[in-house]
Amino acid sequence: MRKQILLSLITFTSLLDGQCQTKLDKAFQLLRGAVDTGEVPGYLALVARRNEVLGHEARGLCDIENNILFTTNTL
């Protein structure tokens, strides 16, 4: 069985608080666009800073052959 999985881990360590959410939104938007255009089948992304989860999102397929979607609990 062939699985195609895209995992994205985005780390922001030196962003100012005001800039963090804007940059995080842009990063997730970039990932969503890659799935929407078919560039990648799916992704799971978790962004954390100082033991705090700033964003956690899943989109698209983690197993194309069996049509299984990514969820935030997929790994």
Image (spheres, rainbow, N blue to C red):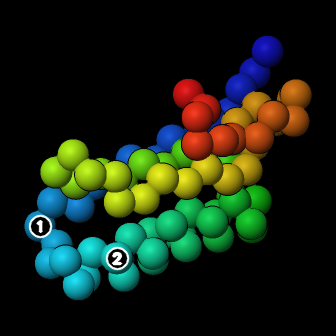
- What residue sits 67% from the left and 53% below the top? 59
Disc 2 element: helix
- Determine which residue is flagged by label 2: 21
Give amino acid for label 2. Answer: Gln
**Number of on-image labels:** 2
Q: Quadrant of the N terminus?
A: top right
Q: With respect to residue 11, does 14 lie above or below? A: below
- What residue sits 76% from the left and 40% below the top? 69
Give amino acid for label 1. Answer: Ser
- Report the front residue among 5 and 12: 12
Residue 36 in picture, x, y percent from top left: 74, 66
- Report the front residue among 4 and 17: 17
Q: Quadrant of the C terminus?
A: top right
- What residue sits 44% from the left and 69% below the top? 27
Which residue sits furthest top?
1
Residue 47 in picture, x, y percent from top left: 36, 53
What label sits on residue 36 in the rendered view?
Answer: none
Which residue sits furthest right?
66
**Which class describes the residues within 10 Å of circle 2: few (<14), some (14-19), or many (20+)?**
some
Q: Is residue 13 visible?
A: yes
Q: Is residue 3 left or right of residue 21?
A: right
- Of callouts 1 and 2, which one flags the residue occurring earlier in the amino acid sequence? 1
What label sits on residue 14 in the rendered view?
Answer: 1
- What residue sits 55% from the left and 73% below the top? 29
